[in-house]
Amino acid sequence: MRPIINALLMFSLLVIMGLKANAADESPTVNVVPYAVELSTIMEYKGGDYLWFHPRVSPLPGQGKDGQSAAIMTFQKHLFLSDYYSGLSYKTTYDGGKTWSAINTPAELAWVDAGKGIKVSPADMTPGWHAATETVLNVGAEVRYSSEGKQLADIKRAHQTTYSVYDPKTEMWSKLKRVEMPLDDKFDVARSACAQWVALDDGTVLLPFYYATSQEVPHSVTVAQFSFDGKDLTYLRHGNEMDLDVVRGLVEPSLIKFQDTFYLTIRNDERAYVTSSKDGLNFAPFKPWTFEDGEDLGSYNTQQHWAVSPAGGLFLCYTRRGANNDHLFRHRAPLFIAQVNPHTLQVIRKTEKVLVPERGATLGNFGVVRVGGETWVTVSEGIFTDAARASQATGATFLARIIWGQL
């Protein structure tokens, strides 16, 4: 009898050990990646007639001086009406961000006169390096404005996506072009705006979109794949369609590839969401962003963006409630970064640091990009209230450099 009991005990022990091993396989331990943040100011403007806004960077590989990193940053004027923006300007650096060029405002990126006082402008642009063609592809919203600066929906497909291409060899930009989406009415509003996107090894590009039949209905999100030859984006296909019937629905998604998986973070008026995919097109059901203890992250109605460490860590950059910031519009400062558990899609609270401090202005419209061995986060202070104008904010455009491997 005893051999049978011993055998049963041994079998039970093996089962328990197997269950524990399976549980560990399902959620492996995440190695916390050390990092430090160095903050500098690229430019400042507090003249009251506009603010510099939407600063986002692309690396220029191989263009730097003496082995240093080179990069180009595009940005534009916020003209103090809701989402009223000028055309694009840009600066370049060839010494790792220590010094920047004067402001350049090329005619190719300016407002386009559509007649009857209507101007068409690029906005919410995100530049990125396209290695296969050795160009910078800059993608964002195409916006129609009245002479008073109001956004218009006066024609079919007024709210679409635009792009321009920068050639670092000639230092020239192409004229703005529209991204042509399928003729289905559901894409009458279709924007890849304020969005991190991914260039694949085969040269095709994955652009995350938010879309709808009109601005008056909740938006949906999908990721679309395009061919790109250095001049033209051509639609190939799009993945599964994600919906949420809450206020404006799902908007401003950002995409990253980390190891062998794609991750998508999504903005909603009430909270932020996250999901993942193996092919970058077809995503699992999305879920709210939380810390590892299950508490809501507290980011809402504001974009979030990704960062990836060379040492193998996935990070999220975001704003949130609960940071002594109830006085700020949508709690849009300070700007945070923290490591993400890629297996549970949760933020590791103990890794959270402030990227850019709160000085009385908002910091909700920002960019994140890998430049050399560092990650650069760029953001401009939004000074839109009397309290912000009276604060220590200076209309600064900040560069927060994430130095991996340091504390």
Image (tube, grey):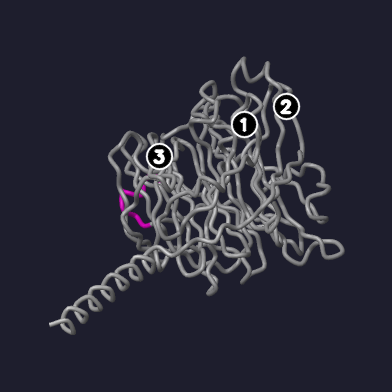
Q: CA distance from mark 2 to mark 1?
A: 15 Å
Q: Nearer the viewer, mark 1 or mark 3?
A: 3
Magenta span of residues? 182-189
Disc 3 element: loop
Queried whether the magenta region covers residue 188, the answer comes back as yes
Mark 1 vs 3: CB contact within 8 A: no
Marks 3 and 2 close (CB-CB < 8 Å): no
Q: Hey, what amino acid is under mark 2?
A: Thr
Q: Nearer the viewer, residue 177 or 265?
A: 265
Within the magenta stretch, is there residue 294?
no
Q: Position of residue 308 (x, y in %)?
A: 58, 59
Looking at the rendered structure, the secondary structure element under dot 1 is: strand
Other residues around mark 1 within 10 Å, as few (<14) / some (14–19) / many (≥20) = many
Say what secondary structure mark 2 lies in. loop
Q: Label 1, on which residue?
A: 78
Q: Residue at x 60, y 53 (%)?
A: 138
Sequence-earlier tag: 1 or 3: 1
